[in-house]
Amino acid sequence: MNKNSSNIMALAPNTSNKRETICIFGTGDFGRALGHKMIQSGYPVVFGSRSTQKSSLIPKDAEVLSHAEAAQKAAIIIIAIQRQHYNFLTSLAEILHGKVLVDVSNNLKINQYPESNAEYLAQLVPGAKVVKAFNTVSAWALQSGTLDASRQVFVCGDDMEAKQRVMDIVRALGLTPLDQGSLLAAQEIENYPLQLFPMWKFPILLSLCLTAFFFFYCLIRDVIYSYVYDNKDFSFFIAISIPNRICPILALILLALVYLPGVLAAIIQLYRGTKYRRFPDWLDKWMLCRKQLGLVALAFASLHVLYTLVIPIRFFVRWRMNSQIISQALNNKTEPLNNTYAWLSDSYLALGILGFFLFVLLGITSLPSVSNNVNWREFRFVQSKLGYLTLILCTAHTLVYGGNRFLSPSSYRWYLPNAYMVSLIVPCIVLVVKFVLIFPCLDKPLTRIRQGWERNPQYSEQSNYIINKSAV
Ligand code: NAP
C-alpha cells in the first residue's frame, strides 16, 4: 500500500455502519475526488452525468447514471459543476424537490456575482434545501489524502437538519465541519479560497518599503559617502553590514507599529469620551494585522541574531582587529581597559539577548495551538505587558548601542544621522505616549470608558442609531 492510500485509510472512520447513498452531479476532477473519498468512507456513490458511459477515471464502485436517474437514488446531491452550467437544474426541479443540494462551487474572482453561487442555486431550485460546503478543500487534497492545507470545511445553510446531515458526512470523511450559519454566509465562504494572505499584505508591503528606504539610506551613508570623501570602497558592506543594520531597525520599528494603533485608539477614545463609536477604517485594519506585523518583526530580529553571530568570522572584522593589534605592537603602546565602554557593550548585548528572548516568547504565544490554551487575561498579559517590556528592552538595546555617539557631529554624514537613530523615533513616541497614558488622570477615565462609561451620552444615541440602522 502506498503512502497516500495509507493516509486515506487513516482518515476514514469506521465503515461498518451502512451509510446512505450520495449522489454527485458532475464527473469532473472534484466530483471524482469527492466520490472516491466517500466510497472510502463507506458511502454508496452514484454519479449524475451528461454521459452515462463509465470512464476508467471514475471510482469502480460508483454507478454513473443520467442526472434525473441518479437524483432519484439519493436524498443528498452534491453539485460538482461550475456555476455557469447550473441552468439545466431547473428542468429537474420536480425531482430535486425536498432534496439536500450541496453547493461546492468556487469562483474565479472575489465577489464575482451579486449573489453567492449557493444562493443562486437556491433561487434556481426553490424546493430544494441548499447547503454550502466542501469548497475550501481541493480535489487534489481529497484524492491524495494528504489534506495538508486545512481539514476545515465551512458549512452554511438555511435548513438546520440539512446542514446537520452534510456536517455528519464531512465528519465521516475525516474532516472538520465549521458551522458558519445561514446561506447568507455563502458569499464569504466562496471568497475564502480566493484570498491570498489578506492579513499579511500590509505588513509585508510596509516592510518591503522600509527595507528599500533603509537600504538606500545606509548605502548613501556607509558606502557612497566613504567613497566620495575618503576614496574607500566599502561596497562589500552590502552583503552583511547593511543587512545587519536594516534587520534590527525593521524589527524595532515594526514592533513599535504593533503597539502604536493601541495607543492611538486610547487617545481617540479619550478624546471622544466613549468606546461606542467606530474607529476609522485604517485604524481598524491596522489593529487587525498586528499579529502579522509582530511576526514579521520577529523574523527581522531573528535575521539580526544570525547576522550578528557571523561577525567574528568576517574577513573585514578580523583584518581590522589584526591591524589594531599590530599598530599597538608597532607603537609599543597598549590601550587600557575602558570600563565605561565595557559596561556599555555588555549592557547593550544583555538588553539585546533579553529583548530577543521575550520577542520569541511573544511569537510563540501568538501560535493558535498556544493561544488556544490560555485564557483571555493571560493572552493579554503576554501580548500587552510582556510586549511593552520587549519594546522597552529592544529600544534600550538600540539606545545603549548608540552610547554617547548621538550628539557627536562625526556620526552625521551629509547631515544624515545614523540609521539606528532614525529607527528610534517611532518606538520612543509609542513608549512616551504609553507612559503618559499610565498617569491616573488619563488611565482612570480610559478604564471607565472601556468599561462602557460615556462622557457625553449623545454619542451612545448616535451609535445606537447607527447600530439600529445597520441591523435594519
Ligand atoms: P471540472 O473538472 O471542469 O468538472 C465539472 C463537471 O461539470 C464536468 O466534468 C461535467 O461533468 C459537468 N459539466 C460541465 N459542463 C456541464 C454542462 N453544461 N451541464 C451539466 N454539467 C456540466 O470542474 P471541477 O474541478 O470538478 O469543479 C467542479 C466544481 O467544484 C466547481 O464548481 C468548482 O468550483 C468546485 N471545486 C473544485 C475544486 C477543485 O479542486 N477542482 C475544489 C473546490 C471546489 P459530466 O461530464 O459528468 O456531466
Image (cartoon, rainbow, N blue to C red):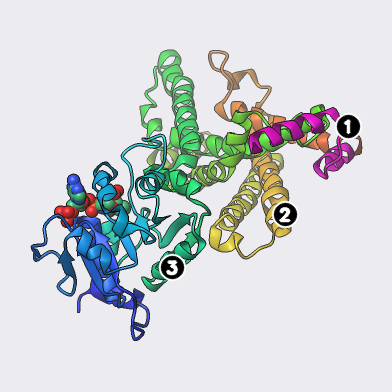
**Quarter of the image containing the N terminus?**
bottom left
Q: Which residues are magenta?
A: 443-472
Calculate the distance from the C-alpha at mark 2 to the C-alpha at mark 3: 42 Å
Dot 2, crowdedness within 10 Å: few (<14), some or many (≥20)?
few
User: From the viewer's perspective, is the residue at label 3 or at label 1 nearer?
Assistant: 3
Q: For the residue labelled by badge 2, is the local secondary structure a helix, a strand or a loop?
A: helix
Tell me the crowding category of disc 1: few under 14, some 14 to 19, or many 20 or more residues within 10 angstroms, Cα based.
some
**Is 43 within the magenta?**
no
Snapshot quadrant of residue 215: top left
> In the rendered structure, are the residues bearing label 2 and label 3 in contact, judged by CB atoms less than 8 Å apart?
no
Distance Cα–Cα, label 3 vs label 1: 51 Å
Q: Which residue is mark 2?
A: 381
Q: Which of the 4 image quarters holds residue 119?
A: top left
- The residue that label 1 is drawn on is 455
Name the amino acid, label 1: Arg
Which residue is under mark 3? 165
Q: Earlier in the sequence, mark 2 or mark 3?
A: 3
